[in-house]
């Protein structure tokens, strides 16, 4: 089996890597590119811990075959802090509000929640609580009970709107 | 296992014919879990998402053409489509989370062959057709004739669904899809009901009633359609719809729903979907 050469943009940088055709994008990100933010929870698209943006659309990286990334623009949780239009090493407002709101305990689901929440706020800067809950319905958290996550997304939305 | 990304239907057709054990896929939301649960890997994974024809929706000459691999999120965000076919949009929109919606497709939902496929009943209610490419060219069959049983399709080796065609509905027509799941979201339907009605004032002049998840395939319920046609969706007619839908349900018993429950809910949902479709038809 020959490894495929894949060229894409990851977190704003032109990137290339080699992967077996059946390798998931999640495994390629973690094992070939060292981006271990996205996690494997279920491997079947149920838990959302591996959420990444592909051309701006939130997707489970475990359901994407690595060669599908050819030519695509990917954003992982590692790209949030530099991709929010805030200079330097500042955390994205979502990351900051998750920290301040204690929206995580074990943290395994957190990268997926952050990426899915960013996808929501990118196209809906003022979501209702119900819209947030629907947008995050593909992300499972077994620690927090979700409420602090929802509050943190609401607070980040307020901050992002006032920053505009 | 190899990966191929053809850019034309002809190229995909050739790849499929030349590689025994190969398989086409769109969003892989069913393919990956199946592979991970031990199903044999295909020899070649043929990605259909780089073929323009499979990724676009068009409306002209009185009918809609929907690419079989187009993400359902693109279909449900198409305002014109959702206003004409709210029921099909509801069905397509129930397929999983946003993460899944950006990958799942009408073609994949149909060809996975699940009796509980959410987008299928409303497609059948609008008499959607599937355009199928194979080694001998293309043929068009009713969506209702694609799935023959759980995971079983009428497609021959080397065939795949390219797109769906749906005619513009007549004036004063509305459709609706309602499903029942043990959870409110992220779950598989234990009953789905799609209804499409055409109204003339208060009188129903045409009706289609289709149930999902209560038989080996999605099923039409002719007795419920007959009860609706000519009625004003009065209580007596709706009682007949309820009884006919329950009678047509032949579900399995599993951890998500018992036979008794599914049979009863099939009747209730068919009635509610009929009322909602009629409201939309009058609007």
Image (cartoon, coloured by chain):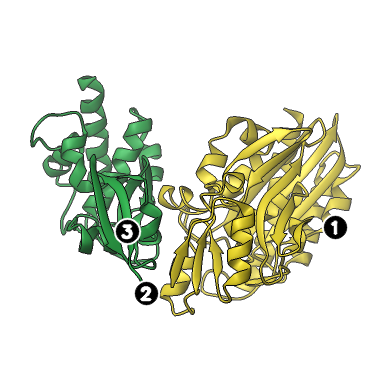
Task: Pick the residue in front: B41 or B256.
Answer: B41
Could you say which is closer to the camera, residue A152 or residue A59? Answer: A59
- Look at the numbered disc 2 and give the secondary structure of its residue: loop
Residue at point 63%, 75% (across, down): B252
SS assignment at label 1: helix
Residue B137, picture quadrant: bottom right
- Colour of chain B in the image: yellow
At 63% from the left and 61% from the top, the residue drawn is B13
What residue does disc 2 label? A1
Q: Are marks 3 and 1 in contact (CB under 8 Å)?
A: no
2 or 1: mark nearer the eye: 2
Q: Nearer the viewer, mark 3 or mark 1?
A: 3
Q: Which residue is mark 3?
A: A5
Residue tagged by mark 1?
B222
Residue B58: horizontal and vertical position, in percent? 66, 36
Horizontal arrangement in the rendering, residue B13 relative to residue B183 (left or right): right
Residue A146, visible in the rendered structure: no
Chain containing the residue with disc 2: A
Instruction: Work out how far the residue at label 3 is from the one at label 2, CA to CA, in angstroms.
Output: 13 Å
């Amino acid at each position: 089996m020959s490894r495929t050469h894949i060229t894409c943009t990851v977190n704003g940088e032109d990137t290339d890597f080699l992967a077996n055709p059946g390798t998931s994008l999640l495994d390629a990100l973690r094992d070939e590119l060292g981006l271990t933010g996205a996690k494997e929870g279920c491997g079947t698209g149920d838990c959302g811990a591996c959420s990444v943006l592909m051309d701006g659309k939130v997707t489970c990286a475990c359901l994407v075959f690595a060669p599908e990334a050819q030519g695509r623009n990917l954003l992982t949780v590692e790209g949030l802090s530099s991709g929010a239009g805030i200079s330097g090493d500042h955390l994205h407002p979502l990351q900051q509000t998750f920290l301040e709101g204690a929206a995580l305990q074990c943290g395994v689901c957190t990268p997926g929640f952050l990426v899915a929440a960013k996808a929501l706020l990118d196209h809906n800067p003022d979501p209702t609580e119900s819209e947030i809950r629907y947008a995050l319905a593909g992300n499972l958290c077994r620690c927090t009970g979700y409420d602090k996550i929802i509050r943190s997304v609401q607070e980040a939305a307020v901050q992002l709107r006032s920053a505009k | 296992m190899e990966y191929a990304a053809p850019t034309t239907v002809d190229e995909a057709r050739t790849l499929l014919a030349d590689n025994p054990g190969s398989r086409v896929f769109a969003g892989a939301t069913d393919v990956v879990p199946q592979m991970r649960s031990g199903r044999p890997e295909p020899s070649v994974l043929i990605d259909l998402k780089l073929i323009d024809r499979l990724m676009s929706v068009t409306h002209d000459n009185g009918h809609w053409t929907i690419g079989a691999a187009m993400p359902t999120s693109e279909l449900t965000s198409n305002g014109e489509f959702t206003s004409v076919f709210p029921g099909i949009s509801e069905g397509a929109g129930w397929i999983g989370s946003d993460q899944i919606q950006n990958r799942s497709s009408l073609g994949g939902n149909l060809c996975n062959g699940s009796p509980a496929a959410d987008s299928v009943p409303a497609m059948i209610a609008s008499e959607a057709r599937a355009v199928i490419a194979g080694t001998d060219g293309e043929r068009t069959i009713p969506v209702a004739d694609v799935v023959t049983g759980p995971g079983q399709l009428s497609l021959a080796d080397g065939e795949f669904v390219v797109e769906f065609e749906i005619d513009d509905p007549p004036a004063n027509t509305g459709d609706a899809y309602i499903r029942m799941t043990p959870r409110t979201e992220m779950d598989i339907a234990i009953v789905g009901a799609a209804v499409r009605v055409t109204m003339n004032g208060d009188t129903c002049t045409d009706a289609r009633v289709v149930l999902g998840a209560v038989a080996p395939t999605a099923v039409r319920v002719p007795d419920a359609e007959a009860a609706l046609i000519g009625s004003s969706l009065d209580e007596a007619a709706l009682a007949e719809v309820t009884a006919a839908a329950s009678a047509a349900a032949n579900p399995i018993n599993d951890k998500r729903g018992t036979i008794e429950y599914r049979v009863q809910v099939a009747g209730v949902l068919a009635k509610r979907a009929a009322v909602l479709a009629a409201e939309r038809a009058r609007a």
